[in-house]
Image (spheres, rainbow, N blue to C red):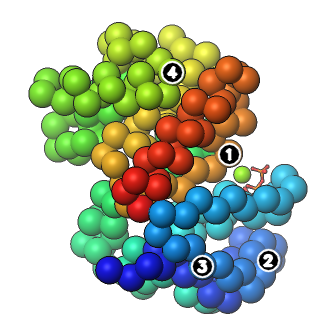
Amino acid sequence: MSDTIVNVEGLNVSFGSAHVLKDVSLSVDRSRTVGVVGESGSGKSTLAKAMVGLVRPSSGQVWVDGIDVATASRRELAAYRRRVQMIPQDPFSSLSPRQTVGQALAEAVDPRRARVGRHRDLIAHWLEQVGLPADAMHRYPYEFSGGQRQRVAIARGLVIEPSLVIADEITSRSTCPSRPRSSSSSRRSSSRSA
Ligand SMILES: Nc1ncnc2c1ncn2[C@@H]1O[C@H](COP(=O)(O)OP(=O)(O)OP(=O)(O)O)[C@@H](O)[C@H]1O
Ligand SMILES: [Mg+2]
């Protein structure tokens, strides 16, 4: 297995006439945690989205975990999305208001049947890892604070133990006491399975 899990080369992304990413290159080895720093609007979320195929590059290569994301087939991308998890910056827009937290995590584990059922212990484990009580699985996203919702999104990203986690400012809404815990559990997961 290759040591490199991410290899971005000469990536350019434009939205209309706005050239947001200009000639971005980056390489990440497995078992490594890499942070990308930049001011608001500099393109960090755009880079994350390009790495999971949500944003199309105008040019350049985005090679992640064995596939060229920009040119991959639908089938390749579907399998890829089981191995590479992006935890979004805004968890409200990514969590369905009609699903309990348990169903959201169950859907990550088994997209065809979003039922807690036999995944109950696994779901409880990952909720506890991010500092939430196991019974949070029975509640809906609107019943949580912004920071708690962000922790739900982190748990959902980690529950399938992906080979790569792309975390977009995942601690920006967290209250201080939860920060070290959620960052270290995501780091543990990425270093264990990446
Ligand atoms: N879908 C889009 N259509 C048009 N412009 C966009 C789109 N997505 C992002 N942009 C623009 O691209 C630039 C980079 O946005 P991006 O969200 O990547 O920044 P960021 O570094 O993540 O900022 P922040 O720290 O505030 O989250 C911004 O000027 C933004 O307005
Ligand atoms: Mg952003």
Q: Which of marks 4 and 2 is in front?
A: 4
Q: Is mark 4 on a helix, strand or loop?
A: loop
Q: Name the residue under label 3.
A: 27
Is residue 189 rendered to the left or right of residue 79? right
Closer to the chain start, of discs 2 and 1, is 2
Q: Which of marks 1 and 4 is in front?
A: 4
Amino acid, disc 4: Gly
Query: x%, y% of residue 150?
Result: 57, 31
Q: Mark 1 points at which residue?
A: 169
Q: Mark 2 points at which residue?
A: 19
Amino acid, disc 1: Glu
Establish if 52 lies above or below 153.
below
Closer to the chain start, of discs 1 and 4, is 4
Point out the quarter of the image occupied by ligand 1. bottom right
Label 1 beta carbon within 8 A of ligand 2: yes
Circle 3 Cα neighbour tier, 10 Å, few/some/many (<14 / 14–19 / ≥20): few
Closer to the chain start, of discs 4 and 2, is 2
Do the residues bearing badges 2 and 1 touch, measured as CB atoms within 8 Å?
no
Q: Mark 4 points at which residue?
A: 131
Is residue 188 rendered to the left or right of residue 124? right
Which quadrant holds the N terminus?
A: bottom left
| Label 2, label 3: how far apart the Cα atoms are | 22 Å
Residue 183 visible in image:
yes
